[in-house]
Image (tube, rainbow, N blue to C red):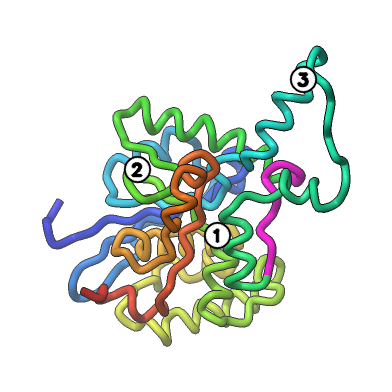
C-alpha cells in the first residue's frame, strides 16, 4: 500500500453477521474514496479488514459500566451482604458509562445502555471480536487512544454535525437527503458507487459514518478521554465523537 494512503474502516455491528455492515475508505491528500461497502459481514471479514487499516471504528459499546460490573460480581456472592440501592439514580450509574454521560452532554441524547438494553447482545459479540483482533496481533485499547480500534456512535456524530437525522434509520428518503448532504459538504469524498446501498440500508449508511468517525479519531479531531477518565475508558470504552465538521476531515489541522 502507498505511504500516501490512509486506510480507514467502519463497522455497524449487530448481534449476528446478518445486518452487520463494513465500510472501507482510502484517504489521500487529494480526498477520499469509499472503496468497499458490504452487508452481512462476519468476524473473520472484520479481522481481515482491521489488519490492513490505520483505524477501525466499531459502532458498539466496547465495555460495561464499572458500577454494573461491580454490582453483578457482588450480587452473585450470596455470602456477602446485599446492599443494592435499587433506586432510579443508583440504577442510572449501572446503566450508563462515563462516555455515555459525556456524549449526552455534547449532543443531548443518551446512547443506548449496554447493560439494560438489547445492545448488550451485540456487546457480547463485540467482546469476542476484540479478543480475535488481539489474538491476530492487533493492539486493542478500548479507550481508543492507542491501537487499531475506536468505539463510534454514528447517530451522535451526525448530531454533533448538527444534521437533521429524524427518522434516518427507518426512512430511506431521509438517508437519501443525508447522502446528498455528504456529497455537498465533502465533494472530495467519492461515495457514488455505493450511494444506493447507503440509501437502501441503514446499516450500510451507519458503517460509512462509523468510518468517518474513525477518520476523525485517526487524525486527532475528536474528543478523547480526559485524563481523569483515562483508566475508566480503558475498561468501559470511549465513544470517539468528532470535534470537527465533515469537511475538515480532508485536511487535518496541524
As drawn, the residue found furthest toward the left would be 3
Task: List x then y, in percent, for residue 155.
Answer: 59, 66
Q: Quadrant of the C terminus?
A: bottom left
As drawn, the residue found furthest toward the bottom would be 184
Q: Considering the numbered disc 1 on the image, is that residue within a helix, a strand or a loop?
A: loop
Residue 209: say if magenta.
Answer: no
Q: Is residue 231 left or right of residue 125?
A: left
For the magenta stretch, what is the residue range? 109-118
Task: Work out whether mark 3 precedes mark 1 in sequence or the reverse, and give the earlier one.
Answer: 3
Residue 154's image quarter? bottom right
Residue placed under numbered mark 1 in the picture: 153
Q: Residue at x 78, y 24 (%)?
A: 75
Tag on residue 220? none
The reply to whether discs 3 and 1 touch (Cβ–Cβ < 8 Å) is no
Task: List x then y, in percent, for residue 158.
Answer: 55, 73
Q: CA distance from mark 2 to mark 3?
A: 37 Å
Task: Work out whether mark 2 precedes mark 3 in sequence or the reverse, and give the earlier one.
Answer: 2
Task: List x then y, in percent, for residue 15.
Answer: 63, 39
Residue placed under numbered mark 3 in the picture: 76
Q: Considering the numbered disc 3 on the image, is that residue within a helix, a strand or a loop?
A: loop
Residue placed under numbered mark 2 in the picture: 50
Classed neighbour count for the residue bearing mark 2: other residues with Cα under 10 Å, few (<14), some (14–19), many (≥20) = many
Classed neighbour count for the residue bearing mark 3: other residues with Cα under 10 Å, few (<14), some (14–19), many (≥20) = few
Amino acid at each position: 500500500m502507498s505511504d500516501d494512503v490512509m486506510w480507514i474502516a467502519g463497522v455497524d455491528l449487530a448481534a449476528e453477521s446478518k445486518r452487520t455492515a463494513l465500510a472501507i475508505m482510502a484517504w489521500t491528500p487529494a480526498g477520499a474514496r469509499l472503496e468497499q461497502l458490504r452487508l452481512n459481514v462476519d468476524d473473520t471479514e472484520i479481522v481481515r479488514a482491521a489488519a490492513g487499516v490505520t483505524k477501525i471504528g466499531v459502532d458498539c459499546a466496547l465495555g460495561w459500566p464499572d458500577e454494573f460490573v461491580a454490582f453483578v460480581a457482588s450480587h452473585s456472592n450470596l455470602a456477602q451482604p446485599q446492599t443494592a440501592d435499587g433506586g432510579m439514580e443508583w440504577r442510572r450509574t449501572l446503566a450508563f458509562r462515563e462516555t455515555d454521560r459525556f456524549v449526552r452532554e455534547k449532543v443531548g441524547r443518551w446512547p443506548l445502555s449496554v447493560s439494560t438494553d438489547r445492545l448488550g447482545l451485540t456487546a457480547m459479540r463485540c467482546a469476542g471480536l476484540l479478543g480475535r483482533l488481539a489474538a491476530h496481533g492487533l493492539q486493542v485499547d478500548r479507550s481508543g487512544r492507542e491501537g487499531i480500534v475506536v468505539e463510534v456512535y454514528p447517530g451522535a456524530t451526525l448530531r454533533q454535525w448538527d444534521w437533521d437525522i429524524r427518522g434516518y434509520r427507518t426512512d430511506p428518503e431521509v438517508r437519501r437527503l443525508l447522502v446528498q448532504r455528504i456529497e455537498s459538504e465533502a465533494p472530495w469524498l467519492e461515495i457514488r458507487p455505493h450511494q444506493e446501498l447507503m440509501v437502501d440500508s441503514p446499516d450500510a449508511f451507519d458503517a460509512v459514518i462509523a468510518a468517518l468517525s474513525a477518520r476523525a479519531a485517526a487524525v486527532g479531531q475528536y474528543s478523547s478521554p480526559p485524563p481523569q477518565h483515562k483508566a475508566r475508558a480503558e475498561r468501559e470504552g470511549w465513544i470517539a465523537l468528532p470535534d470537527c465538521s465533515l469537511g475538515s476531515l480532508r485536511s487535518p489541522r496541524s
